[in-house]
Amino acid sequence: MFAQFIEKYHPAIIIKLTRDCKTQGEFDDFIKKMYDIYNRNKMFNLLIDTQNVKNFGISYPIQFAYFLLKVKPLTKKYVKKSAIVLSSPFMEKIVNIVFKISPPTSDMIITRDLKDALIHVIDNDNEDDDIIINSQVTDNSIESI
């Protein structure tokens, strides 16, 4: 799969796009996994890291936008914070297409800095979070996740 779902930093769910999506089947599996997360009926924060994506077929962002429209009531109910890490003007255009169709409903940031995105989505209720973030992030990449 082109996306790695990392769930070890509750309530944050990190989706690291590891490469370009190559087939509709891969994208369908991604959407199914997203539905599974929403169907847990529990609060979560979401980070989507797009740093490794070079190309993305135009149909996938449109399909993702319509997925977001379908889950909008659940997003309002369960997603407290979200972040998107961008690394190219191409992905900025893709995100703009998605949000023209389905504007964000959670407390969202869009950034080029992975550390800022992690700080945003990992609840800082305990001081260990800063240790986790600082030890895992170097050169705008997630290490050993």
Image (cartoon, grey):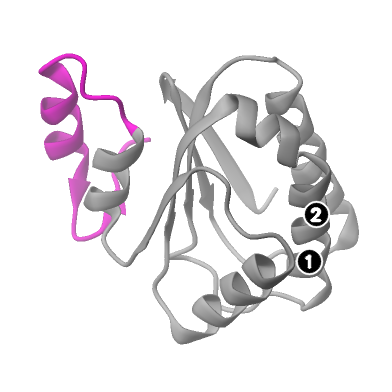
Q: Position of residue 102 (x, y in %)?
A: 70, 60
Most foreground residue, 18 or 99: 99
Q: Assign a secondary structure to mark 2.
A: helix
Q: Which residue is at the front of the view, 126 or 57?
A: 126
Q: Is residue 120 magenta?
A: no
What is the magenta range? 122-145
- Numbered tag placed on residue 27 in the rendering: 2
Disc 2 or disc 1, which is closer to the eye? 1
Q: Residue at x 83, y 73 (%)?
A: 59
**Where residue 52 sits: x, y (%)?**
48, 65
- Which of the image's four quarters has the C terminus? top left
Please state the horizontal and vertical placement of residue 45, each as a whole percent of the image: 47, 32
Quarter of the image where one finds residue 65? bottom right
Pick the residue in front: 95 or 21.
95
| Disc 1, SS | helix
Position of residue 32 relative to residue 125, above or below, is: below
Contact (Cβ within 8 Å) of mark 2 with mark 1: yes
Q: Is residue 91 left or right of residue 109?
A: right
CA distance separating discs 2 and 1: 7 Å
> Which residue is at 63% across, 60% downward?
103
Q: Is residue 96 above or below residue 133?
A: below
Q: Say which amino acid is labelled 1.
A: Tyr
Q: Residue furthest bottom?
A: 89
Q: Is residue 51 left or right of residue 44?
A: left
Vertically, is 37 above or below 34? above
| Dot placed on the residue nearer the N-terminal end, 2 or 1 | 2
Query: In which quarter of the view is residue 79 placed?
Result: top right
Kind of residue indicated by mark 2: Phe
- The residue pinned by badge 1 equals 60
Q: Position of residue 6 (x, y in %)?
A: 49, 32
